[in-house]
Image (cartoon, rainbow, N blue to C red):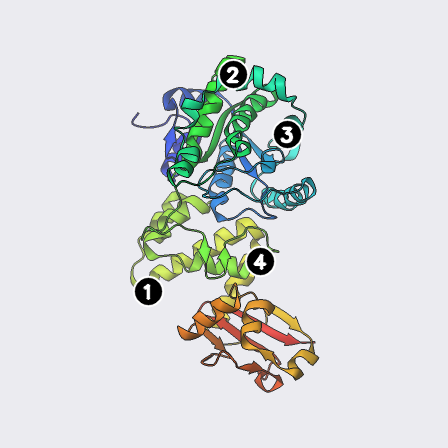
Amino acid sequence: MSAYKSEFLRTLSERGFIHQVSEPDALDKRAAAGPVTAYVGFDATAPSLHIGNLISIMMLRWLQKTGHRPIALMGGGTSKIGDPSGKDTTRSLLSPAQIDANIASIKTVFARFLDFAEGRAVMANNADWLDALAYIPFLRDVGRHFTINKMLTFDSVKLRLDREQPLTFLEFNYMILQAYDFVELFKRHGCILQMGGSDQWGNIVNGIDLGRRLANAELYALTTPLLTTASGAKMGKTESGAVWLNAEMMRPYDYWQFWRNCEDADVTRLLKLFTDLPLAEIARLGALAGQEINEAKKVLATEATALLHGRDAATEAEATARQTFEEGTLAASLPTVAVPQADLEKGIGVLTAFAEKTGLVASNGEARRQIKAGGLRVNDTPVTDEKMTLTAHDLTPEGVIKLSLGRKRHVLLKPI
């Protein structure tokens, strides 16, 4: 097919979201004829989604912006099992209370990207139907449509077994429940399209097949490519861990810095995927060369941060970075951690300051490695002694101690 007729698929194609589509001509015809309902599932294995989930959230956003209805499906039921896709080991089982708390935290992000007013978007939870299933009837009605032979060929199973890692019977059921979700959403909301990452293709196709068998439904699949950098690395990790979407787990300033620090070759692609900027403006920014490409990175960082945290937070993060790196001032809006004055009088070990107090590094061991590599600084002076102690003598004229990881990440210690 040379070009999509529907604005939805044309937009996703032009902005680089599409990896695979089942029956693209038929889906394009449906989307061109009128509104369709589509969903993405999100398991609640942590209090926040991460950058790897953002590409799917942006697909839901463009689905709605082009006149269709998105469903954000919370995995209140499937989170009790855990998706084995891409995992070498079994996930830790969470209690129902933990899952409910995670879902409550995760939900706060979606209002930034989707308009839920008057049913224009739906927030669903698969615990509503999975928790009520009766085991024997479910096996008879649904399980009989799945063969072990076929299930063993899916990557989520095959890769685990090829690495000689155990796959529990509990996890083995995950793909059946995900397929059943598709059928339930078709029955409840008229949902005909499931979207997700490329690793979900087999699970989504299972749902298409089950929908045809149980409800004579014409369902479709659409997946996105794996999110990697131009150099081939998996995108979404920093020195301190995952890039989380909830502000409680990653501050807006650090989120802004993540985008600002992207590789030059990734700027155009990331602007297409993670901002609402028009393609013509993205082409202009992507054509910038030399040092000017940094201006495009700042636009990417500000626009991506504004979508998630709001325009005010994005503007503040940009101003903080400018003051810190371009004007050379110690910005008052840098992330600040309060420490008791008594602790400072006793002395705070530099390893403790970077790992426990600020979280700039994940552990004392990581702090030691960074010191050896010259990656840690106190008040812009490299740390050379892992036994160094921070005291009131290290306070700047502004009454803080500036801790830095590399050139981009900074936290202020402020005594109280």
Q: Distance between the residues labelled 1 and 4?
A: 25 Å
**Residue 1 in picture, x, y percent from top left:** 30, 25
**Is residue 331 among what the camera can see?**
no
The residue positioned 37% from the left and 35% from the top of the image is 19
Q: Mark 1 points at which residue?
A: 291
Say which label, 3 or 4, has the lower sequence index: 3
The three-letter code of the residue at mark 1 reads Gln
Q: Name the residue under label 3.
A: 119
**Residue 329 in picture, x, y percent from top left:** 51, 76
The three-letter code of the residue at mark 2 reads Arg
Q: Mark 4 points at which residue?
A: 313
Disc 4 vs disc 2: which is toward the camera?
2
The residue positioned 29% from the left and 62% from the top of the image is 290
The three-letter code of the residue at mark 3 reads Gly
Q: Distance between the residues labelled 2 and 1?
A: 61 Å
The residue positioned 49% from the left and 57% from the top of the image is 241
The three-letter code of the residue at mark 4 reads Ala
Placement of 345 over or under 408, stated as above or below? below
Q: How far apart are marks 3 and 2 (CA)?
A: 35 Å
Where is residue 356, by image quadrant?
bottom right
Say which label, 2 or 1, has the lower sequence index: 2
Q: Distance between the residues labelled 3 and 4?
A: 28 Å
Secondary element at tag 3: helix
Task: Please say if the residues under marks 1 and 3 sit with CB atoms less than 8 Å apart.
Answer: no
Task: Please say if the residues under marks 3 and 4 sit with CB atoms less than 8 Å apart.
Answer: no
Crowdedness near tag 2: few (<14), some (14–19) or many (≥20) residues, C-alpha within 10 Å: few
Secondary element at tag 4: helix
Placement of 165 over or under 231, stated as above or below? above
Query: In front: 87, or 383?
Result: 87
Q: Distance between the residues labelled 1 and 3?
A: 46 Å
